[in-house]
Image: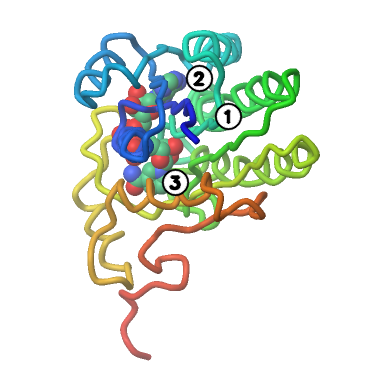
Amino acid sequence: MSRTVLVTGASGGIGKAIARRFLAEGASVVLSDRDEARCARTAEELAAPERVSAVAADVADPESARSCVRTAWEHADGLDVLVNAAGVYPSRPLLEMTDAQWRAVLATNLDGPFALSTEFARALVDRGRSGDIVNITSGAGDRARRGAAHYCTSKAGLTMLTRALALEFAEHRIRANAVSPGFVEVDSDVNPLSAEYVRAVEAGRPWPRPGAPDDVASAVAYLCSEDAEWITGTTIAVDGGVGAGNAALPLA
Ligand SMILES: NC(=O)c1ccc[n+]([C@@H]2O[C@H](COP(=O)([O-])OP(=O)(O)OC[C@H]3O[C@@H](n4cnc5c(N)ncnc54)[C@H](O)[C@@H]3O)[C@@H](O)[C@H]2O)c1
């Protein structure tokens, strides 16, 4: 059955790979990102005009996030899947971090998925429809990293929000799961990373090839498939084994 999927952060590396994967499976996709020009460029790039539409929204603004779901629902005549992939991961040591910097990351990475997911679920419940939510978390939600207290906290919160959504929405046949990527290269202008940081992260990865946005998209597609019908409230780590341990440590 053909489904309609709303993807936030759809102009970013991971979001775009997820949108492309759903299109390849025959779904229709509503792309959402912060500004219209960015969304329009992505829609053009995905080259499937009859199955792609776009709704610009700032997920850090709860009203914009909720209205994104409502507009997408109207444009697409209903939604079946929500993927919360919009996110920011700036670096700032705690002793230099302002309240505004802390809030901005929490607002985008945690408040946004709360507003989107609850609005999406409300629309489904009102119409007696089932659906799937997938949140893109991060290994940073399990392991603190210097300069990323706001980011790590937001993703740990998003993991717990995913479980809470799963628990409360199960009776409505709405599943909620998360995919937790390790580092995957995305060439982002929104979220630049230093070469030194990337080298250090890659050195600790057990699996002998770099991860890619498509690896994340595959896990999202699986979680939204019929094969995963009994899976809710869980997180799949897609990280080349980084969660298992640090491969860069020498033998003792
Ligand atoms: N790339 C990685 O290594 C990695 C690892 C773990 C988790 N993640 C998570 O994956 C998700 C996607 O990140 P990415 O690496 O593709 O980065 P990216 O910068 O390529 O994409 C992020 C997208 O989110 C959008 N966005 C940011 N703030 C927004 C807002 N307020 N409203 C609407 N859109 C907004 C940006 O415009 C951008 O298109 C994020 O949630 C990130 O935390 C990424």
Q: The disc labelled 3 sits on which kind of residue?
A: Ala
Q: Does the residue labelled 2 lie within 8 Å of ligand 1?
A: yes
Q: The disc labelled 2 sits on which kind of residue?
A: Val
User: Contact (CB < 8 A) between labels 3 and 2?
Assistant: no
Q: The disc labelled 1 sits on which kind of residue?
A: Pro
Q: Position of residue 160 (x, y in %)?
A: 67, 45
Task: Identify which residue is drawn at 30% across, 50% down.
Answer: 184
Pick the front one: 238 or 88: 238
**Disc 2 on helix, strand or loop?**
loop
Q: Which of marks 3 and 2 is nearer the N terminus?
A: 2
Q: Determine if residue 92 is in view.
A: no
| C-alpha distance separating marks 3 and 1 | 19 Å
| C-alpha distance separating marks 3 and 2 | 22 Å
Q: Earlier in the sequence, mark 1 or mark 2?
A: 2
Q: How crowded is mark 1: few (under 14 residues within 10 Å), some or many (20 or more)?
A: many
Tell me the quadrant of the picture where the C terminus can be found. Answer: bottom left
Q: Position of residue 83 (x, y in %)?
A: 49, 34
Tag of residue 221: 3
Task: Identify which residue is drawn at 21% across, 38% down.
Answer: 187
Q: Residues within 10 Å of mark 3 (few under 14, many from 20)?
A: some
Task: Identify which residue is drawn at 67% across, 50% down.
Answer: 233
| C-alpha distance separating marks 1 and 2 | 8 Å
Q: In which quarter of the image is residue 114?
A: top right
Residue 241's place in the image compared with 89, above or below, is: below
User: Contact (CB < 8 A) between labels 1 and 2?
Assistant: yes
Question: Which corner quadrant of the figure contains ligand 1?
Answer: top left
Residue 214's place in the image compared with 104, above or below, is: below
**Which residue matches tag 1?**
113
Q: Determine if residue 179 is in view.
A: yes
Tag of residue 59: 2
Q: Does the residue labelled 1 lie within 8 Å of ligand 1?
A: no
**Disc 3 on helix, strand or loop?**
helix
